[in-house]
Amino acid sequence: MATVTIYSSNYCPFCTRAKQLLSSKNVDYKEIRVDGAPKVRAEMTKKSGRTSVPQIWIGEKHIGGCDDLYDLEHKKQLDGLLNK
């Protein structure tokens, strides 16, 4: 199973939704909180080119945010990426 990394914030409903989808698939993920951590947020922004959370990687592939994750699920492509 691919390694999943998610940059998130404590009070972000989109982060919660993304983590719920991953958990519903029994996917373990590494969560990196950006709350009160400007250096961590800057690292996330540099890697993703985006400032919003969540930002999600499956393996080395940047997926994007919550909507992007759900889009992959609706297109039936998420499981394939997770199982690489």
Image: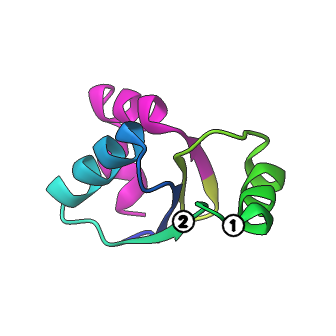
Q: Nearer the viewer, mark 2 or mark 1?
A: 1
Q: Are marks 2 and 1 in contact (CB under 8 Å)?
A: yes
Q: Residue 39 is drawn in which quadrant?
A: bottom right
Please state the horizontal and vertical placement of residue 75, each as a whole percent of the image.
33, 26
Name the residue tied to disc 1: 37
Q: How is the image coloured?
A: rainbow
Q: Reply yes or no: does residue 67 show up in magenta.
A: yes
12 vs 34, left or right, is left
Q: Which residues fall within the magenta stretch?
A: 62-84
Q: Which mark is residue 75?
A: none
Callout 1: helix, strand or loop? loop
What amino acid does circle 2 point to?
Arg
Residue name at image x 18 percent, y 65 percent: 26
Name the residue tied to disc 2: 33
Q: Residue 76 is drawn in which quadrant?
A: top left
What is the chief secondary structure element of the magenta stretch?
A: helix
57 vs 72, left or right, is right
Q: Nearer the viewer, residue 13 or 57?
A: 13
Q: Is residue 57 above or below residue 75?
A: below
What amino acid does circle 1 point to?
Ala
